[in-house]
Amino acid sequence: MRRLYKYALLNETQDKLDYALALQPNDFLERRLQTLVFKQGLAKSIHHARVLIRQKHIRVGKQVVDVPSFMVRVDSQKHIDFALTSPFGGGRPGRVKRKNAASKSAGGGDDE
């Protein structure tokens, strides 16, 4: 029961076994990292959220998490953010952006 409270599946007042047995699969799916990343607006879609998580762009607290099915606790929910090493979180720019910056500085004005 204590674990169900930590994951916000039950309230502290719902301390009977009947409440735990009445939980639906949807209740568990709402606590997944993939769903929470999408609902917080860090991703454009639920599929985009999954890709961001698998590519290690998302962290929970200080830990980078790459498992979309990670169950997020209530106290960890407010710490979901982009990873520090991610281009989305202020890290090193991505491959295409670095390539474009290098071509602009080297080539200059080869426009047709």
Image (cartoon, helix red, strand yellow):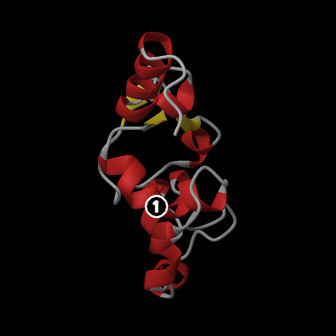
- Identify the residue at the far top of this view: 106
Give x and y (percent) for residue 100: 45, 28
Question: For the point 69% across and 66% down, which residue is it?
Answer: 13
On screen, 14 above or below 7? below
Closest to the observer, 46 or 11: 46
Element type where label 1 sits in the image = helix
Give the image quarter of residue 39.
bottom right
On screen, 7 above or below 97? below
Question: For the point 55% across and 54% down, which residue is it?
Answer: 37
Whether residue 77 is visible, yes or no, is yes
On screen, 6 above or below 106? below
Closest to the observer, 58 or 2: 58
- Identify the residue at the far front of this view: 112
Q: Amino acid at mark 1?
A: His
Give x and y (percent) for residue 60: 48, 36
For mark 1, what is the residue? Answer: 48
Give x and y (percent) for residue 32: 45, 61
Left or right, residue 39 beside residue 89: right
Question: For the point 43% across and 83% down, which residue is it?
Answer: 25
